[in-house]
């Protein structure tokens, strides 16, 4: 996996949650979970005032920065959490 620059996330206070999810498979809050699972309805309904306006930016950022196995469907999200992020998923193939 290539290095991810978490300082470029669209909403800076979300960087830690995204990093913990990618690196350790730690589940983020409901907004980020919905976004990573490609659940637009869930993302919109759980977004705070800052994230709601940045949903399009989040999608572009994820497309350009995150490995495709980490997001895009509920199955990918669940698999990433189950294998405990990058280290666990790398160990398991």
Image (cartoon, rainbow, N blue to C red):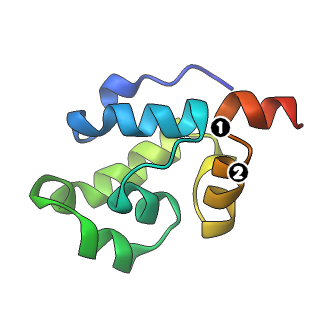
User: What residue is drawn where x is 40% and y is 43%?
Assistant: 61
Q: Residue reaching furthest right?
A: 93
Pinpoint residue 66: horizontal percent, then vertical percent.
55, 40
Give whichever of 20, 70 is nearer the camera. Answer: 20
Pinpoint residue 47: horizontal percent, then vertical percent.
23, 63
Pinpoint residue 62: horizontal percent, then vertical percent.
47, 46
Q: Is residue 70 above or below residue 6?
A: below
Label 2 sits on a secondary structure element that is: helix
Give whichever of 22, 81 is nearer the camera. Answer: 81
Give the quarter of the image for residue 23.
Answer: top right
Number of residues whose C-alpha sits closer than 10 Å to that of mark 2, classed few (under 14), some (14–19) or many (20 or more)? some
Q: Residue reaching furthest bottom?
A: 41
Q: Which residue is mark 2?
A: 82
Give the quarter of the image for residue 9.
Answer: top left
Tell me if 13 is positioned left or right of 5 in this view.
Answer: left
User: What residue is drawn where x is 33% and y is 33%?
Assistant: 15
Pinpoint residue 58: horizontal percent, then vertical percent.
35, 51
Q: Is residue 60 above or below residue 13?
A: below
Location of the C terminus (image quadrant): top right
User: What residue is drawn where x is 80% and y is 31%?
Assistant: 90
Tell me if 8 is positioned left or right of 4 in this view.
Answer: left
Number of residues whose C-alpha sits closer than 10 Å to that of mark 1, classed few (under 14), some (14–19) or many (20 or more)? many
User: What residue is drawn where x is 45% and y is 59%?
Assistant: 33
Q: Which residue is mark 1?
A: 85
Tell me if 83 is positioned left or right of 22 in this view.
Answer: right
Cα distance, mark 1 to mark 2? 8 Å
Tell me if 66 is positioned left or right of 51 in this view.
Answer: right
Q: Is residue 62 above or below residue 65?
A: below
Give whichever of 64, 91 is nearer the camera. Answer: 91
Q: Which mark is residue 25?
A: none
Location of the N terminus (image quadrant): top right
Label 1 sits on a secondary structure element that is: helix
């Amino acid at each position: 996996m290539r290095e991810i620059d978490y300082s470029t996330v669209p909403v800076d206070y979300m960087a830690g949650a995204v990093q913990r999810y990618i690196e350790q498979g730690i589940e983020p809050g409901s907004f980020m979970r919905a976004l990573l699972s490609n659940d637009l309805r869930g993302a919109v309904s759980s977004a705070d005032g800052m994230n709601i306006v940045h949903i399009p930016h989040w999608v572009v950022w994820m497309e350009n920065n995150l490995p495709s196995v980490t997001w895009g469907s509920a199955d990918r999200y669940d698999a990433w959490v189950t294998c405990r992020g990058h280290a666990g998923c790398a160990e398991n193939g």
